[in-house]
Structure formats: C-alpha cells, structure tokens
Amino acid sequence: MRTEPRCSECDSEDPKIISLRNPARERYCGRFCLNKGHESFIRWIRRANAEVAS
Ligand SMILES: [Zn+2]
C-alpha cells in the first residue's frame, strides 16, 4: 500500500505544486488550492502576531 502525496486543501491525488514553506507536508493540486492554503497561513500568522503584540 503506497502513500501517495495528496493536495493539502482538497485532498485530490497527484498534487503538482509543493509549498516552499513546508515542502514535506504541504502540496497543492493547483494554484487555487495553493492560494487557499496561503490564505489560511497568512491568517494564522496575523493572529500569532496580534497575540505577541498584545
Ligand atoms: Zn487541491
């Protein structure tokens, strides 16, 4: 049983784009999912920064 890499967003097979942030775990099937993954990452960063600043 092989473990194929899957898109981090939509879980589709054979993702073509590998995230530069986290190449081991984040892969995306296309630019749409790459952008979605990027947005959630940016939201997370902003929240983390806000917590540090407060
Ligand atoms: Zn996808």
Image (tube, rainbow, N blue to C red):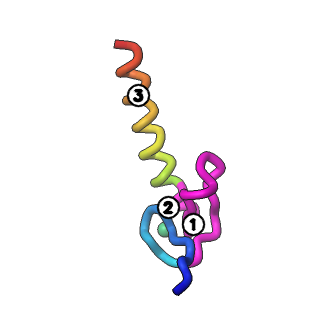
Q: CA distance from mark 3 to mark 2?
A: 23 Å
Amino acid at pointer 2: Cys
For the stretch drawn in magenta, what is the main secondary structure? loop
Contact between labelled residues 2 and 1, with CB atoms less than 8 Å apart: yes
- Residue 44's place in the image compared with 32, above or below, is above
Q: Which residue is mark 2?
A: 33
Q: Quadrant of residue 15?
A: bottom right
Residue 28 spot, x, y in % from top left = 55, 64
Q: Which contiguous range is marked in magenta? A: 14-34
Residue 46 spot, x, y in % from top left = 42, 29
Q: Is residue 29 magenta?
A: yes
Label 1, ligand 1: CB separation under 8 Å: yes
Contact between labelled residues 2 and 3, with CB atoms less than 8 Å apart: no
Q: Quadrant of the C terminus?
A: top left
- Residue 14's place in the image compared with 21, above or below, is below
Q: Which residue is mark 1?
A: 30
Q: Secondary structure at mark 2?
A: helix
Q: Secondary structure at mark 3?
A: helix
Please state which of the two labelled residues, at mark 3 or mark 1, is closer to the viewer: 3
Please state which of the two labelled residues, at mark 3 or mark 2, is closer to the viewer: 3
Amino acid at pointer 3: Ala
Q: CA distance from mark 1 to mark 2?
A: 6 Å
Label 2, ligand 1: CB separation under 8 Å: yes
Q: Secondary structure at mark 1?
A: loop
Q: Which residue is mark 3?
A: 48
**Nearer-N-terminus badge (3/1):** 1
Residue 1, numbered circle: none
Contact between labelled residues 1 and 3, with CB atoms less than 8 Å apart: no
Amino acid at pointer 1: Gly
- Residue 20's place in the image compared with 49, above or below, is below
Residue 16 spot, x, y in % from top left = 64, 69
Q: How many marks?
A: 3
